[in-house]
Amino acid sequence: MKFTKMHGCGNDYVYVNCFEEQVKNPGEVSRFVSDRHFGIGSDGLILIRPSHKADFWMDMYNADGSGSEMCGNGIRCVGKYVYDHGMTDKTRVTIESGGQVKTLELQVENGRVKTATVDMGEPITQPELIPVISDKEAVVAQRIAVDGKNYEMTCVSMGNPHAVVFVEDTRTVEIEKTGPLFENNPLFPKRTNTEFIQVIDRKNIQMRVWERGAGETLACGTGACASAYACIVNGKTEDEITVHLLGGELNIRYDRESGHIFMTGPATTVFEGEINIEA
C-alpha cells in the first residue's frame, strides 16, 4: 500500500489515495499503521476517496481503529494532497467528511499548498446533536466532577463532539489520567474529545487536547474551533483568536453574520512510502 505521511500542527495521519489503492478493513489498517513502534506512527488513517457530494471524500479512522466524522487538521492536509498530486488544479475545493461538505481555500506557494482556510460551518450546541446528555438547551459552563475535581464544561460539536473546560495552567493538567475519564464519561453517548483551555488574553488561548480514540495529540483543528466558540459564548475572548497548541498555531475566526467558523493553518508533507499491510 502506497501512503503519504502528513501533519497539521503535529496532528499526523497516514494518507492513502483510494483513487489508486484499495484498503480492506480500514479500522484494522489504521490500528496497524498508527502504531509508533511497529507501524508508521500516526494519530490515525485518512483515505481519500471519490465523492458524490463534493470534489473529494475524506474517510477517517482513529488510531484505535474507530471511525471519526471530522478532523480539521486532516482536511487541510487532504486539500494539500489533492492539489500537490495534481488531482485538482483548483485552489477552492470541497471535501466531504462525516456526511458534511466543507469548503477549503488553498494558499499556494511555489506550486505547493502551504496553508489552507476551511469553512468549518456553524458550531452545534444542541445537546442531542453533539451528543451530550443534558436537559438544557445548551451546555455552557456546566459543572462536572471528574476524579473528585470540579470543572466548568461547555459542549460543542464541529461535526464531532467536544467538551471544553477552562484551567488556570494547561501545563499542570494530568491529561493521561483526566482525558480518558472525560472521553468515557456516561454523559457522552459517543465518547468525546476534551480540550483543556488556558486563556492568555482576549486574542490568545493555550490548548491541550485529549482526542477520543487517539489520546493526547499535538493539535486538533475541530477542537480549536470548538474551544474558540466556547471562549466567545463564555465572554472570554474576541471573535478572532490564535490557538496555541503543542504542535503549532491555528487562527480561528467566528463570523457572526453567517454563524460560521473559519480555521486557517498549515499542512505539511513529511514523507511518502509503501508498506506491506498483509504482514
Image (spheres, helix red, strand yellow):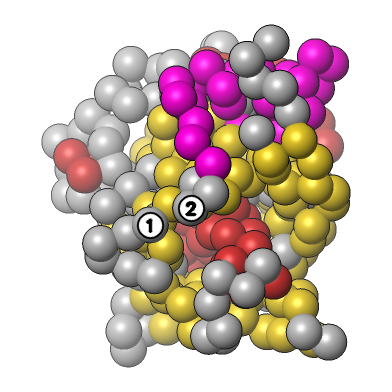
Q: Are the two marked residues, 1 and 2, in contact with CB atoms closer than 8 angstroms?
A: yes
112 relative to 61, above or below: below
The circle drawn on residue 180 is none
Q: Which residue is mark 1?
A: 50
Q: Which residue is mark 2?
A: 19
Q: Position of residue 55 (x, y in %)?
A: 39, 70
157 relative to 253, above or below: above
Q: For the magenta stretch, what is the residue range?
A: 21-44
Q: Estimate the spatial distance between the alpha carbons at disc 1 and disc 2, rounded to whole Å.
A: 7 Å
Crowding near pointer 2: few (<14 within 10 Å), some, many (20+)? few
Q: Secondary structure at mark 1?
A: loop
Instruction: Name the residue located 33 percent from the left edge and 48 percent from the top edge.
Output: 98
Residue 165 is at least partly visible in this image: no
Left/right placement of residue 4 relative to residue 104 reads: right
Given residues 95 and 209, the one toward you in this image is 95
Left/right placement of residue 145 relative to residue 10 reads: left
Q: Secondary structure at mark 2?
A: loop
Identify the amino acid type marked 1: Pro
Given residues 124 and 84, the one toward you in this image is 84
28 relative to 268, above or below: above
Q: Position of residue 243 (x, y in %)?
A: 69, 62
Instruction: Name the residue located 39 percent from the left edge and 25 percent from the top edge.
Output: 191
Given this view, does label 1 or label 2 mark the residue nearer the observer? 2
Q: Give the quadrant of residue 1.
A: top right
| First of labels 1, 2 by sequence position | 2
Q: Position of residue 2 (x, y in %)?
A: 69, 40
53 relative to 104, above or below: above
Q: Is residue 123 magenta?
A: no
Residue 5 is at least partly visible in this image: yes
